[in-house]
Amino acid sequence: SATEQLELSLEEFNLKLNSNFIRAGEDLNLPMLERAEYAVVDDAVSKIKHQATHSHIQGILNRNGFMLNLTNVSRDRRRFDQTHVLMVIGFDQIEMIYTQRGMEAGDLLIQSIADKFISQLRKEDILAAFTESSFALLFLNVDQQYTQGVADKILNQFKNFSFTHKDETYSLGINIGLVAYIPSITSPEEGIRRADAAYNAAAKAGRNIMQWYDNAGIAFDEQQSLARWAGKIDRMFQNNRFFLRCQMIVPLNNTVAFMPRYEILLGIRTDDPNTSEVIQISEFIPILERLRRIHEIDLWVLTEFLDWVNDNEEIVNSIDSFSINMSVLSLSNLDILNFLHDQFMLQKNIATKIFFEITETVAIEGYNAAQNFIDQMRHYGCRFSIDDFGSGHASYTHLKNLSTNELKIDGFFVKDIAQSNQDYAMVKSMNEIAHSLGMHTVAEHVDSIEAIKCLRDIGVDYAQGYYLHEPMPLDSLSHSV
């Protein structure tokens, strides 16, 4: 006021606002001086509400603001029985751009995407930045045909969209999930859940896919099962159902080391204590990836393996190397990077016995993260393999630039090599390229003596598969070395 000044922190201001001690709203019957005081309060309240409901990206709401608008629509009697449409739009690569290029680059990308959305919308449509890599849209009082047309335009606009930052170009994929939303039938929370489910079904089907909730079919049951899997994974950790296995990598000629090599594999016991049956990892890993929890498993494997190394120094010294798989989320995960730095500073010798396996797909989609991980871990003497080579779209330039030590040829080309001239030629080509780059080669999923003969003729260095050695618990390795 003209005679007193009251200073409040933001927290204090919010407390007084919520307790109605401070009230917003201009009363035109008050004297001008008092109205001026209320104007200060109104301005502060407006700023606080804006910060709470808007993204730092200019001109769009955040998740809280979107849900507030959606709730208001559900309470509006004029809108109560109307049909609206909710749309969730997600982009791959955005999280990687934030991680690799920083906040400035990520925000520039989000702003450019938001600007393109705004150009497609009516004034009454509501746009929000829902997560770091996804947006939500609410179309008021529309039919499916209209929204389908807008979604088609958005999909076509972004399916070949790329983002360039400091001479690095990223190709973004887009997926869209849609659901009809009638407030008298569906709650705001359920509407969002259904739109998310449709989006997840689209993302599972591949890049640049659109999916309506009503047409997603079995995919929704799978999405709903993810929530059950999340709880199941927690119980697996709590009940110690994970264990480490190993499988031998066998040399095929006399030009490579004869000390045994092993790949470290994850094992999962069933919840039946009376059986030794193991859950199929091939079914489990995709679920972890979709839940974005695969890095938790990678960290568990690394921790358990290095603990085993500490307890089995004599055995470790008799083994040439151990291969350990790394997922794309793990390559840039700070917990994993800090853990490895700490461990390798304490156990300098073990680092030289580790091959980190990075799949070809991960090496390309997360190229910068892979390169950064390789650069950091090579400092300690670690070696690296490109796994499942042939399953993705890596160029030989990528192979050369990543400078890995080994190339593992995807088993898809190996399993029928004795019967297929095409597979034989493909494996031979991969082997020659790898050798020309100074890399050893490993053939995966070898399941017959005929395949081994072909691989020896070609000159592949190592082979791995159930025909040569079935995976066994790591703890039992001491009995066979």
Image (cartoon, grey):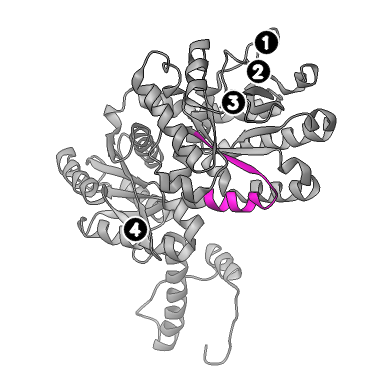
Q: Is residue 177 magenta?
A: no
The spot of residue 476 in percent (x, y) is: 76, 18
The spot of residue 377 in percent (x, y) is: 64, 49
Left or right of 226? Residue 70 is: left
Query: Where is 395 relative to 46, above or below?
Result: above
Q: Earlier in the sequence, mark 2 or mark 4?
A: 4
Three-letter amino acid code of the residue under disc 2? Arg
In this rendering, the label closer to the viewer, 3 or 1: 1
The spot of residue 304 in percent (x, y) is: 73, 33
Q: Which residues are magenta?
A: 370-387
Query: Total marks drawn?
Result: 4
Q: Is residue 383 magenta?
A: yes
**In this figure, which residue is indicated by the disc labeled 1?**
276
Separation (CA) of disc 2 from disc 3: 13 Å
Q: Residue at x 71, y 24 (%)?
A: 239
**Front-lying residue, 401 or 251:** 251
Q: Look at the numbered disc 2 and give the secondary structure of its residue.
A: loop
Residue 232's disc number = 3
Q: Look at the numbered disc 3 and give the secondary structure of its residue.
A: helix
**In this figure, which residue is indicated by the disc labeled 2?**
269
Three-letter amino acid code of the residue under disc 4? Phe
Q: Quadrant of residue 199?
A: top left
Residue 179 visible in this rendered orientation of the protein? no
Query: Where is 261 relative to 4, above or below?
Result: above
Q: Are marks 1 and 2 in contact (CB under 8 Å)?
A: yes
